[in-house]
């Protein structure tokens, strides 16, 4: 009948055909046909290997001899049913599907295949190590438990941690500390309870832990599917887009989410040069460490300046840094440049981070460096001095 | 002498030499603490902030010392008294709640006793709301720049921002707020006699209080390894009375004047051609075709040539006493000693006098201009520029002739 090896390739063949059908239905067009073709080719290859393994009885010469099989202890059928061929088949199928779909599926298939192969090889070897089944089982444990236990524990913990992270990313930001404290307190309380009642049956402890873990994994799965909360308004900087930086509306060609230099300057978020607040039709600059608002403000030449813009106006506004006016004589024609950087439109009540740098001192420019807010012409700008 | 005796003698000799060596090192460390000429002595505070640290560190040091002595003495006693002499294993006991609770409570009380003044000092040193003057401090490889924003600093009006380097000049008896940052890598600002240290981190502004009780010069050193010439990144804080500080500010706001001396005039041309690419001199104008000054100021472009995007402003170089990251003196030894030893009453006038031709330490400045990287390694050779993205990390060797160096020095000597 079917040998163990032939079962593996038969399963892989069946899975590849099934995958080809599913993929062919899901994808239409040339790209879809290419995937189907790949999967059917794999099915053909697996079918060939199935035939070879079936015909040669997995290359086991002694197994092909009825007498030898009956007499040799190592040729006795395995003591337990093995799940590794089935898992290896699933691994092969996953690799095949991953090869034509997503790299992550392909990688998962490789991992599954490798794990099944290792387990299968060691199990097969240990089952025939001697005629003593108990000794053989012990041999397998000695070899594989040092790998199985840590890996299983790591994967299990990983799943629990990932589930918990999904929960924490789903709930409201303000509720996060409370949930964290309550969860920690519950775990501590449970641990204390178990430790103080040594007579408690291990089944009860296991049951409580399993129910808790399943609850957490289920909650994590549900919340992961629902998606995480909106965490932060990303720091955004518009550069060399005068149309946007001079407009109170969303400017032409404006990127809604740049997340460029501002977000890279992580350190600056905790200790910015100044906070610029738009409130009551006034632009106010509070420099780090300085008690009173400043106008003008002085910043260093050649230094990365990080500021936070707080929009406390009732409507969306942006902060623009006017970085002077420079003239250049090109072939007898005077060309003027007015470099600017600005935030994107910031919602009322929101903050945004802005990073910029002055390469030249103020005296190099024919116009002062200033902070302004487009659309508020009566607003007194904040002058920026660069010595 | 037998072979055994010889080897025993050799072992003794090695032990004796090791003991003498260790005793020598210990003595050197102990005597090092007795040095009188130690400008960066943190145990000699010269301002209220450093005094607060001093008031904290002595009692904490005392408590830590006593605890340390008790612990070491106990360990030594136990090791000797109960050493293995082949005696019977004593009875093993477990758990002495009274003793364990006592040994937990005593350290807790000591920690609380030390913690309360420590936290109080940390908060008082972090306070910035009562400062009366603001200076932006920017570290870069390997020098410090100081910018004074528009403000009233300790009663002195600063109408336009001014910039200097190497020496932080502050009015005495005035709480000054330093806003410290960096242009390139992490540095650390420390004037031991005036306050503790504060890291200068790119993209961040770290506040630090600074106050000097008396006029004088207070030495400091970058205390965060910041590259090849970290050891040559020094700084001085200069305390001036309010009147003297007012005079200093007024002078610093003046643009450079046209040189009068003929050699200095040629030096101005050389400076314009060679140095003004990186060094700003306020008031230095572009030249017209007829040799007269135009109305267009020369704007240095250190951002094109230097990693940090900045180079010291040299408008008033000769009002400072040091150059190149406060590492070399602009004053001769004699004049430097006279200035540093001056009484608080005499100090202001001497300092404001700047570098006179008689006191000018020409040799070191000349060497610097001739080949700066030879004095302060900076990866500034053409071959190493690729490592810095095509930019220098300091002043390169400009291969100037002796005549050009003479002219530049004549020009710089008038930058007061």
Image (cartoon, coloured by chain):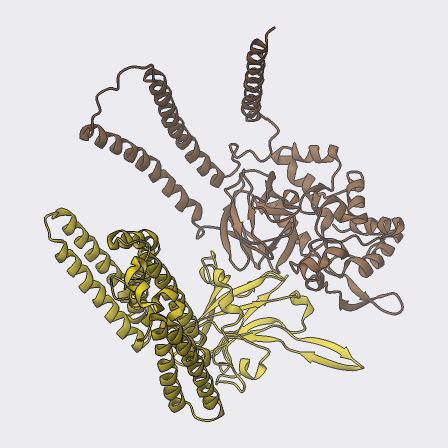
**Residue positioned most to the top:** B1
Q: Can residue A231 be seen? A: no
In screen coordinates, is B10 left or right of A331? left
Position of residue B134 measured from the top left corner of the image (x, y, whole percent): 53, 54
User: For the view shown, which residue lies furthest in the bottom direction?
Assistant: A29
* Looking at the image, residue B179 lies above or below residue A60: above
Task: Tell me: residue A360, above or below residue B383.
Answer: below
Q: How many marks?
A: 0
State the quadrant of the N terminus of chain A: bottom left
Q: Residue at x 58, y 54 (%)?
A: B185
Find residue B80 and report its horizontal and vertical position in percent.
36, 16
Colour of chain A in the rendered structure image: yellow
Residue at the (72%, 58%) spot, across then down = B385
Q: Is A140 positioned to the left or the right of B140 in the image?
A: left
Residue B234 located left or right of residue A349: right
Please tell me the colour of chain B.
brown
Q: Is residue B330 left or right of residue B224?
A: right
Q: Is residue B77 in sight in this rendering?
A: yes
Q: Position of residue A150 (x, y in %)?
A: 33, 55
The C terminus of chain A is located in which quarter? bottom right
Q: Quadrant of residue A156?
A: bottom left
Q: Residue furthest front?
A: A67
Residue B143 x %, y % = 65, 49
Vertical relation: B392 (above or below) A222: above
Q: Nearer the viewer, residue B121 or B129?
A: B121
Along the viewing direction, whichever of B261 and A41 lies nearer the viewer: A41
Q: At 69% from the left edge and 46% from the top edge, which residue is drawn?
A: B320
Q: Is residue B26 above or below residue B296?
A: above
């Amino acid at each position: 009948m079917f040998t163990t090896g032939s079962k593996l390739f038969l399963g892989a063949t069946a899975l590849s055909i099934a995958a080809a059908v599913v993929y062919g239905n899901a994808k239409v067009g040339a790209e879809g046909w290419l995937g189907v073709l790949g999967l059917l080719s794999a099915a053909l290859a697996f079918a060939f290997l199935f035939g070879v393994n079936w015909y040669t009885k997995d290359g086991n010469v002694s197994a092909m001899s009825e007498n030898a099989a009956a007499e040799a202890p190592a040729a006795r059928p395995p003591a337990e049913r093995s799940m590794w061929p089935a898992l290896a088949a699933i691994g092969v199928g996953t690799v095949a599907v991953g090869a034509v779909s997503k790299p992550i599926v392909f990688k998962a298939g490789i991992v599954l295949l490798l794990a099944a192969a290792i387990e299968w090889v060691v199990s097969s070897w240990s089952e025939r190590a001697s005629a003593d089944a108990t000794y053989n089982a012990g041999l397998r444990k000695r070899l594989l438990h040092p790998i199985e236990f840590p890996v299983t524990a790591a994967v299990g913990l990983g799943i629990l941690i990932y589930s918990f992270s999904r929960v924490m990313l789903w709930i409201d930001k303000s509720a996060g500390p409370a949930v964290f404290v309550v969860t920690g307190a519950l775990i501590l309380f449970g641990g204390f309870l178990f430790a103080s009642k040594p007579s408690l049956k291990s089944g009860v402890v296991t049951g409580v832990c399993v129910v808790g873990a399943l609850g957490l994994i289920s909650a994590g799965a549900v919340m992961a599917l629902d998606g995480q909360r909106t965490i932060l308004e990303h720091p955004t900087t518009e550069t060399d887009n005068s149309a946007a930086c001079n407009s109170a509306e969303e400017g032409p060609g404006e990127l809604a989410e740049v997340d460029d230099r501002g977000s890279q300057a992580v350190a600056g978020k905790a200790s910015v040069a100044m906070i610029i607040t738009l409130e009551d039709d006034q632009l106010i600059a509070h420099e780090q460490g300085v008690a009173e608002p400043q106008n003008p403000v002085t910043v260093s030449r050649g230094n990365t300046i990080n500021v936070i813009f707080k929009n406390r106006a009732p409507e969306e506004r942006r902060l623009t840094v006017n970085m002077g006016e420079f003239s250049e004589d090109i072939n007898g024609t005077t060309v003027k440049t007015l470099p600017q950087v600005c935030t994107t439109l910031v919602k009322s009540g929101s903050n945004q981070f802005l990073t910029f740098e002055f390469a030249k001192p103020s005296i190099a420019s024919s116009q002062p460096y200033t902070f302004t807010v487009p659309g508020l012409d009566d607003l007194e700008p904040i002058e920026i001095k660069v010595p | 002498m037998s072979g055994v005796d010889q080897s025993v003698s050799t072992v003794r000799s090695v032990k004796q030499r090791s003991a003498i060596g260790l005793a020598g090192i210990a003595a050197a460390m102990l005597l090092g603490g007795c040095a009188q000429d130690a400008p960066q002595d943190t145990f000699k505070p010269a301002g209220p902030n450093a005094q607060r640290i001093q008031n904290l560190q002595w009692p904490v040091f005392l408590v830590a010392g006593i605890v340390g002595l008790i612990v070491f003495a106990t360990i030594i006693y136990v090791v000797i008294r109960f050493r293995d002499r082949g005696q019977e294993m004593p009875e093993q006991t477990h758990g002495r709640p009274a003793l364990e609770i006592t040994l937990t409570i005593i350290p807790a009380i000591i920690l609380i006793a030390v913690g309360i003044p420590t936290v109080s000092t940390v908060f008082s040193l972090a306070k910035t709301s009562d400062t009366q003057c603001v200076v932006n401090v920017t570290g870069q490889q390997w020098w410090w720049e100081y910018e004074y924003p528009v403000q009233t600093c300790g009663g002195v009006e600063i109408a336009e921002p001014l910039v200097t380097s190497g020496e932080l000049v502050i009015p005495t008896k005035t709480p000054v707020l330093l806003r410290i940052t960096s242009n390139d890598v992490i540095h650390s600002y420390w004037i031991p006699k005036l306050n503790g240290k504060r890291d200068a981190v790119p993209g961040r502004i770290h506040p630090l209080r600074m106050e000097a009780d008396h006029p004088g010069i207070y030495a400091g050193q970058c205390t965060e390894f910041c590259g090849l010439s970290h050891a040559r990144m020094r700084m001085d804080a200069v305390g001036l009375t309010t009147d003297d500080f007012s005079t200093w500010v007024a002078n610093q706001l003046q643009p450079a004047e046209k040189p009068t001396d003929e050699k200095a005039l040629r030096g101005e041309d050389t400076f314009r051609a060679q140095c003004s690419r990186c060094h700003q001199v306020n008031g230095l104008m572009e030249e017209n075709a007829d040799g007269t000054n135009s109305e267009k100021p020369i704007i240095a472009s250190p951002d094109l040539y230097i990693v940090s995007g900045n180079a010291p402003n040299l408008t008033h170089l000769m009002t400072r006493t040091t150059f190149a990251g406060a590492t070399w003196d602009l004053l001769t030894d004699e004049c430097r000693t006279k200035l540093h030893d001056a009484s608080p009453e005499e100090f202001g006038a001497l300092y404001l006098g700047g570098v006179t031709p008689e006191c000018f330490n020409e040799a070191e400045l000349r060497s610097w201009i001739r080949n700066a990287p030879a004095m302060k390694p900076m990866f500034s050779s053409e071959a190493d520029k690729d490592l810095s993205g095509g930019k220098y990390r300091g002043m390169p060797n400009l291969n100037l002739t002796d005549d050009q160096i003479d002219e530049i020095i004549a020009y710089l000597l008038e930058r007061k």
